Every structure is written in C-alpha cells, then in structure tokens.
Image: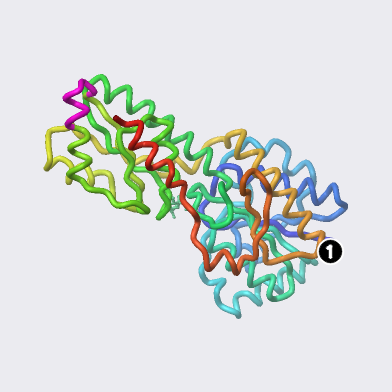
Amino acid sequence: MKRIGIMTSGGDAPGMNAAVRAVSRKALTEGLEVFGINYGFAGLVAGDIFQIDAAAVNDVIKRGGTMLYSARYPEFEKEEVQLKGIAQLNKFGIDALVVIGGDGSYHGALKLTQHGYNAIGLPGTIDNDIPYTDFTIGFDTAVNTALDAIDKLTDTAASHERTFVVEVMGRNCGDIAMWSAVAGGAADVIIPEHDYDIEKVAAKLKSARQRGQKHAIIVLAEGVMHADEFADKLSKYGDFQLRATTLGHVQRGGNPTAKDRVLASQMGAYAVELLMQGKGGLAVGIQNNKLVSHAMTDLFNSKHESHLELHQLVEDLAY
Ligand code: F6P
C-alpha cells in the first residue's frame, strides 16, 4: 500500500476535519501518500481528487464542517457507478481508503473493499446512531450546541414562566435529546425509542407548577414529531404558556469540542493502522473507552444501543 484516499460522506459533523487531519498526518508519518476526495462518493466518481501534504491540514483540527465537502450519493449503490469510482482510484494510484460518515457511507466503503480496495469507516455523524460505538465524531459538539441553546431558553422561560418544547436533531436516535436533556435539567425528554403519554407529561408540568416550578424545558427528538405539533397537542391539557423552538442545522456546525477532536484523532490514526495491517471492510468505534473495529456487515444487521439509562435519569431528576 502506497497511496490512501480519504473522504467525508453524508451529513457533515464537527470533528470531521480533525479526522481528516489525523488520517493524513498518521499516513504521512508512515511514509504513505495521501489523497483527498472531495464531495464523498460523488467526487470519487467525478475524479475530484487532490494530493494532501502535511501543511494542507494545518489548523483544520479546530474547524467545523468538512474541508473535503460532503454529499449524499445513493447512485453509488449501482455497480456501473462503483466501477467508475474504481477507475478513478486506478487513475490516481490509490490502493486503500478511509471513509468518514454514517451508515450510508459504510455501504459504499464495503463495496470498494469488495472490489479489492480496502476501506475503513469512521463514524462521523452528530446523530450517534451507529452500532458498535458508544460515541460518533460530532455528537459531543452537537450536544453542547443544543445545551447552549437550552440554557438560553431556560433564562427566558424562567422570566416569563413558560414551557419550551425544544426540538433537537438525531434522526431516529434520541441520544442528542437525552444527553442535552440531562445536562440542561429538562423536565422531560421525548424520544423515538421510548413511549410517551402526553397526559402524563401534562400532569407532571401541572404538579411542578403547583410546587412553584413554573417554567420548564421539554426536549423533543426530531424523530418523534415537530416541536410545534407537540406543543399543540400538549396545549389541549392545560395552560403551560407553551413556546416551540426547533434548533435545526445549527447543531451541525461550530468548532468541535475537545472530546470530538480527541476522538477523531484517535480514530483517524487507528484507521491508518488497520489499513497498514491489510484490513478493510471494517468500521472503527469506541466502546468502554477502547478503540474497536467491527465488520461493516455486522453493523448493517445491528442497531445502535441508545443511551436509554439517561431517559430514566431525566424522569428521576425532574421531580
Ligand atoms: O444525520 C445528520 C442530520 O443532521 C440529522 O440529524 C437530520 O435529520 C438530517 O441530517 C438533516 O439532513 P439534511 O442536512 O439533509 O437536511
């Protein structure tokens, strides 16, 4: 193996640049040449590829977004499109790749491995919805962004004795919601992985109001419904002075936290080590504080274990 390619694919996540830097610097340290592939699999097929030297990744560790751009490209499922990508790898002499992204990106990475070009996947998504890893790159930053908003909304909620329904991202995963709800001292958290009873939510708010706690934050995961819809339903059960806020794509941006930078650096270097051992078709994760790798095929048949213990914690602490 002489040349490796690196790409970011799917939704961007803070810390992707730190991962690009780590893969690049570790590979250069090991005497390999590194090529950046812009726009994920779409850029691979188009041949949008350039050589990365050590200076090209100077200072990117602290920058949000991805210097390699990103795209969702379902067309890569087709064999004829994959072959066009392979032709580009041959043209640039790239033997192996690191793909930073979510589940969809791993499908493309596995295809490349099956064509004989080892690819390692790194979990880059704010959603924390990838199996076999406790945390994904970008999750911690997104939680902190959501928390910053929740803290601010709590100030205004308290001043007007209002209840805010705060919708956070995460697709069908409630981890951003649960982490930001615990950290933000929310009264309740509503996630796709757990049933909720709107009458009970209302009853909780009412008894809290009777005890003198007249403002509240309810964190709602986007995978359940939209914030205004939830607020509308809740309003039928009492006068809670409701307001709905959707945080949206602000959760995808910003400088990565130290935790995301360290995680991305560790995972990026580990991916290069795996490639140097001749391995491919593996997804990197962190479990119980240890770097791990699992076959991508195992991931496709598994579900991420959401941090459901935090759901109970919100309940227990919201009294
Ligand atoms: O997967 C990351 C994510 O931000 C999800 O949380 C969200 O549902 C989705 O992407 C938004 O996608 P888009 O950026 O295409 O609107």
Q: Where residue 218 sits in the image (x, y, percent)? A: 30, 37
Specify the amino acid type for callout 1: Met
**Magenta residues, start to end:** 206-213
Q: Residue at x 27, y 49 (%)?
A: 196
Hey, which quadrant is residue 46 in on the image? bottom right
Q: Where residue 260 sits in the image (x, y, percent)? A: 60, 40
Hey, which quadrant is residue 277 in on the image? bottom right
Give the mark count. Answer: 1
Report if residue 212 lies within the magenta region.
yes
Q: Residue at x 60, y 75 (%)?
A: 81
Report if residue 67 lies within the magenta region.
no
Residue 239, placed above or below residue 278:
above
Disc 1 element: loop
Q: Where residue 38 sits in the image (x, y, percent)? A: 63, 56
| Quadrant where the N terminus is found in the figure | bottom right
Residue 253, placed above or below residue 269:
above
Q: Nearer the viewer, residue 145 or 140?
A: 140
Residue 294, placed above or below residue 18:
below
Left or right: 209, with 57 as reference point: left
Q: Nearer the viewer, residue 297 or 251?
A: 297
Q: Where residue 162 sits in the image (x, y, percent)? A: 22, 28
Left or right: 141, with 157 as reference point: right
Q: Residue at x 78, y 45 (%)?
A: 25
User: Quick check: can you spot residue 94?
Assistant: no
Hey, which quadrant is residue 161 in on the image? top left
For label 1, the residue is 1
